[in-house]
Amino acid sequence: MIIEEGNIRITATFSEDRTHRYSLRREWWDDDSRPTAVIIMSHASGADIVKGDLTTSVLIQNNLAALGYRAVTCCNLFSRITPDSKLDLAGDVSGFTNENNMQVTLQAIREADVCIIAIGSLSATYKKVAAYQNRLFDLLRDEGFQDKIYTISAPDGSEQLHPSSGKLRAAGSWKLVPYELPTPPPAEKEIADVSIDTDNTTKSGKSKKSNK
């Protein structure tokens, strides 16, 4: 008989009113020799230091662990918490994110070995989403992060997929490939207005969860 025991350390960063989740970090191996990743998706779910969801707790963690990563920090283009996984992107989206979200995301990338772009196809459907994505990509270039940027490639060559994509789930494993941050043409380079938290503060929570 073999008994294994481990701990998953979980850290989350929220706005003071807890309507925005800026990051959710999961660390399953305490081994500094292994790399860490940031993954940027579309919008924050209701997952926190206690509640998990399919994307963060299973799809991301299992696939990155299989590739040898010891931890992941989940960030999102839109930080507003949407437990039903739906946002009204056809209307005013300025309240769906803020400058705190951008700053927390950039700091997480600075501390990680790779950054995985996994926003999905929303920017192809909604111009306002494309504007926020372009702003993020501009910031990543300005910070000199290009060499850290990767995406998940599906067997058919599709890239920039969300972790819950049917193509990735059918593949059963992830292949990370370098991703060249696209430069939009001038006509598409409008930068959306981003609301700013009035108190400019965030709140973190930490937990250790048994992995028996």
Image (cartoon, rainbow, N blue to C red):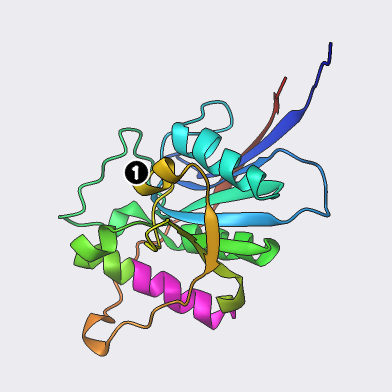
Magenta-highlighted stretch: main secondary structure? helix
Q: Is residue 23 above or below residue 48?
A: below
Q: Residue at x 34, y 65 (%)?
A: 194
Q: Is residue 182 above or below residue 159?
A: below
Q: Is residue 172 above or below residue 54?
A: below
| Residue 146 magenta-highlighted | no
| Residue 94 % position (x, y) | 28, 59
> What is the secondary structure assignment of the residue under circle 1?
helix
Q: Which residue is mark 1?
A: 166
| Residue 208 % position (x, y) | 71, 29
| Residue 31 % position (x, y) | 83, 47
Q: In the picture provided, is 111 more to the left or to the right than 98?
A: right
View extreme (bottom): residue: 186
Q: In the picture provided, is 72 more to the left or to the right than 18?
A: right
Q: Quadrant of the N terminus?
A: top right
| Residue 93 % position (x, y) | 25, 57
Q: Residues within 10 Å of mark 1 (few under 14, many from 20)?
A: few
User: Looking at the image, which is closer to me, 174 or 6?
Assistant: 174
Q: Residue at x 37, y 62 (%)?
A: 158
View extreme (top): residue: 1
The residue range painted magenta reads: 133-144
Q: Is residue 189 visible?
A: yes
Q: Quadrant of the C terminus?
A: top right
User: Looking at the image, which is closer to me, 20 or 2?
Assistant: 2
Kindly identify the amino acid type of the residue bearing the numbered disc 1. Gly
